[in-house]
Amino acid sequence: MPPSNVRAVIASLSLAVTASLISGCAGASRSPVAAAPAASGATIAQVYLWRARPGKFAEYSRYVRERAEPIDREAQRAGAFLDVTTFAVNDTTVPWTHMRVFLLRDSTQLQALSAALAAAGARLEPDSVRRRQMGEYSASLRDRVGGTVTQLLR
């Protein structure tokens, strides 16, 4: 990623984290995936950055709510991660439109996250053809623009 894009992602991430802290202090509602009491035990976060394709912002946001979040809840119940929050920004000056932040206890959870989310998806939709179709549909709505693992400083 060119340095200017890295600065933009860092600035965007900083803005999103600041907004999250402000809304949390104001008593704003959290992600539909309820915060686990152990979320304070998180030491790392897996951050995924997505950009909705032109004209697909609302449709991708709906997809996250209706398809991804049920999978998240199932994976969280199985111990895949401690908490997840999705940030969305409909701003063409930012390189991403949707940021998903998974809070994790440790590197063991991090290493198993992808497989745990896939397993949760398979439990909710046992039909592999239907899962493949949903994967193709989601790919038509957005592009991955980045991701990182961060250490949480507390």
Image: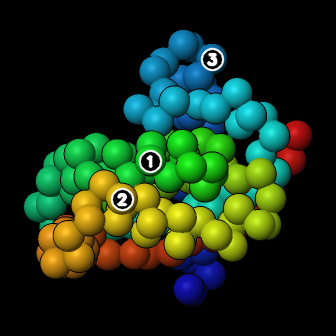
Q: Residue at x 48, y 18 (%)?
A: 28
Q: Residue at x 54, y 13 (%)?
A: 27
Q: Position of residue 50 (x, y in %)?
A: 39, 66
User: Label 3 belongs to which residue?
Assistant: 25
Please give left or right for residue 144 compared with residue 90 in the image: right
- Amino acid of disc 1: Glu
* Visual colour scheme: rainbow
Q: Residue at x 60, y 74 (%)?
A: 6
Viewer-proximal residue among 37 and 129: 129
- Amino acid of disc 3: Cys
Looking at the rendered structure, the secondary structure element under dot 1 is: helix
Q: Mark yes or no: residue 78 visible.
A: yes
User: Label 1 belongs to which residue?
Assistant: 74
- Amino acid of disc 2: Arg
| Upstream in sequence: badge 2 or badge 3 | 3
- Spatial distance from mark 2 to mark 3, Cα to Cα? 36 Å
User: Label 2 belongs to which residue?
Assistant: 123
- Spatial distance from mark 3 to mark 1, Cα to Cα? 28 Å
Instruction: Give neighbour class at mark 1: few <14, some 14-19, many 20+ (Cα, 10 Å).
Output: some
